[in-house]
Structure formats: C-alpha cells, structure tokens
Image (tube, helix red, strand yellow):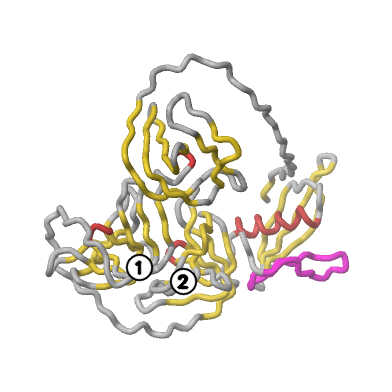
Amino acid sequence: MKKFPIVLASAAMLGVGFAPFTAPAKPVAAATMQVSQASGTVTIKYLKGYGIAVWDSYQPTRKVIANKNLKTGTSWKYFGKAVVDGKTWLEVGTNQWIQADYTDLNSDKVVNTPGKIKINYVPNYSVAVWDGYQAGRKPIKGYTIGHGYTINYFTKVTTAAGEVWYRIGPDQWIQGSYALDVTNGNAAKPSTPTTKPNTPVLKPSTPSQPTLTETKLDGIVTINYVKGYGVALWDSYDASTQKPVGNRKLMHGTSWRVVGQVTTADGHVWYHLGGKQWIDGKYATLMTPTTKLTEKQIDAWVLQHAKIDFPGVPVYGFQVTADGKGNSVVRLSQETSGRSIGLGTYRVTANQTLQRLTTSNTWKTVATGYLK
C-alpha cells in the first residue's frame, strides 16, 4: 500500500505596472570615444510591434529625432560606427545614429537557405566535419570531406566574431574558411588555412539516394537530450533537403505522439510527428502500446485521471495488483475521520487502455495510449 497526500493548487498572475520617471540632470563627464569607418546591414531586435529611437549624434549631448524610429524586425544599412564609453553606435544616415545594443550586430546571423559549397583545402587532404559551430564543438570521428568535393548545405551561420559555418546535415558542420560557396556558380576564395594538414583524404561515397518507406507507428517518444534544452523539429527526414521548422524546439523530458518512422540506409532513425514534422531518433526514446508500463507510470496515469473523476477529493493511497490477465488493477482510497475508505477502482490493460470500474460493475474506458 502506497500512501501520500495529493495537493491541488491554483495560481493567478499579478500584473505590476511601473510609471515612467525623468532622472534629474547630471553634469556630463568626459566620454571615451572611438569612431571608425564601417559598413554593413543590421536587423532591429527590440519588442514586437515597437521600434527604437534614432538620435542626431553619438555624442553625450545627443538628442532623439522626433517622430522617427526603426521598427523591430526591419533591416538597415549602416555607414559608420562609434564606441562611446563602451557602448556601440551605428550611423544609419546623415546625423542619424542608433544604439547597436538593439540590433543583431553582435549576434550570430543564421540563414536557412540551401546552397552548395566546394571544399577548398589542400590537394589530397580533407577537412573535419564538426557536431556544431559554437564553442565546445567536437569533430565527428571518422567523418571528413576531401579537397575539391562539392556538397549541399542547408544553413549558413556567420558568428558575431565573423566566422562562417555551413550545416551539411543534422549536427554536421563545415568551417567556412575551408569552403567556397558555389551556390551561384562563383565565390570569393576563403582565407588560406593556417593549420598544416595531417589527415589523409577520405573521399565520401556518393551512392544514389534510395527511396525510403515510412513505417506506420502508434507510439509515444520522450525527448532525451539535456535538461533545460530542446531538440530541433525538422520538415523532413532527408538530410539533403530538410530544414528546421522555424525556431521550434521539443524540450528534454517532454513526450510526443508519433505516427511513423523512417530508417535511413546507414541505420539512422527519424520519427514522424505528423505533417512536415520530424525529430532525430537519437534524441528520443520510443514507447509503443506494447511496451509494458512501470508501476510508477501506472500510478501517475491513474492519479492524473482520478483528479478529473473525483475533483477536490484528496487521494490518500492506492494499491496496484495484477489480475492474471495482463492487466494492472489500481484501487484508490481516501481518508475520512481517520479511516481509509474506497474511492474508486481503475485498471490498465495490456494494450495501454485506462479503464474505470462503474457503479454497474462494468469497465469504462477513460483514456488510451499512455502519454507522460
């Protein structure tokens, strides 16, 4: 017999407003300034539906230009840059300056547009393929691409430090320093590699892509990644054409129903969530209706529905037993005046159907397919 209290709580959100205020004027201290010629394009990153102010100067005596602001999400060219007391300002027109803090100037620029790159390294040598482009990335063991080979990419990232990276598949990245973007038939030559090659060339095989068949599936997958982080959702299982579905992430520990799966020629599994929604199988644990539930999962599932069937009634304890027919029977109880009395009986069948025993002594199905 397991016994524990179930506490039900409700929460309300409290909105707090703050009135604007004007700080008293202070003497202007001598500012540290550094002005340079620079040009490029930035996108405004502020609040949705709002814009940022445009100033008549980057100097401490600057003033806001009335009735002029740049909306979030719009892109603008800049023609000069000034750093004042550690803050960066961008010149977007004659006597028109904006604060770089509200732009993507110091952010990674991600372009999810497919293209082609040609490996430009040293003849008879190859470049590494990495598992990411950010700090902490690692080369994928045994996976390199030889000088002179052309390969498709699906995402191009320019980091805040100016480094370019190309995504050529799920968690597969090539450093832009060793690649020519030949999407439009020509490209500027990248910087000469500074690292002496020491790996013999490994020429990738280029077999024709076989037609893969999706296997129908009725199951649940639980995301198994890193606590507090999520995995990407893709529009296809085909690494040569797939794109991420916006910025959607499926968080670690969450569970999702799947309708099919595809196993690629190299044994890689992809799960289909319906429509153009796929997840990488290496970050998911599959459970089908034939998977035997643990007692802990049965407990959680029954209690979830008991709170619906018996609202406001505290569940004091329950007991799980097997009926010899592959079903798990759960008897709930509540405590009244110091005594434990029966509350209701449920059972979980072998094919993961949750049923409740009615007053007419018949089993009524209340849920099918366990979902965490």
- Point 78% across, 55% down: residue: 308
In this orientation, which residue lies closer to the viewer: 230 or 321?
A: 230
- Point 27% across, 62% down: residue: 129
| Cβ atoms under marks 2 and 1 closer than 8 Å | no
Disc 2: which residue: 270
User: In the rendering, which numbered label is found on residue 153?
Assistant: 1
Q: Secondary structure at mark 1?
A: strand
Whether residue 71 is visible here, answered yes or no, is: yes
Q: Quadrant of residue 185?
A: bottom left
Whether residue 290 is visible here, answered yes or no, is: no
In this orientation, which residue lies closer to the viewer: 176 or 367?
A: 176
Around disc 2, counting alpha carbons within 10 Å, would you say few (fewer than 14), some (14 to 19), or many (20 or more)?
A: many
Q: Quadrant of residue 117?
A: bottom left
Tell me the amino acid under the disc marked 1: Tyr
Residue 365 among those drawn in magenta: yes
Disc 2 versus disc 1: distance between alpha carbons?
A: 20 Å
Can you give x and y, in whole percent of width and height, for residue 99 in the image?
46, 37
Q: Which residues are magenta?
A: 349-368
Q: Is residue 98 above or below residue 332?
A: above
* For residue 364, side relative to residue 263 (left or right): right
Where the C terminus falls, by quadrant? bottom right
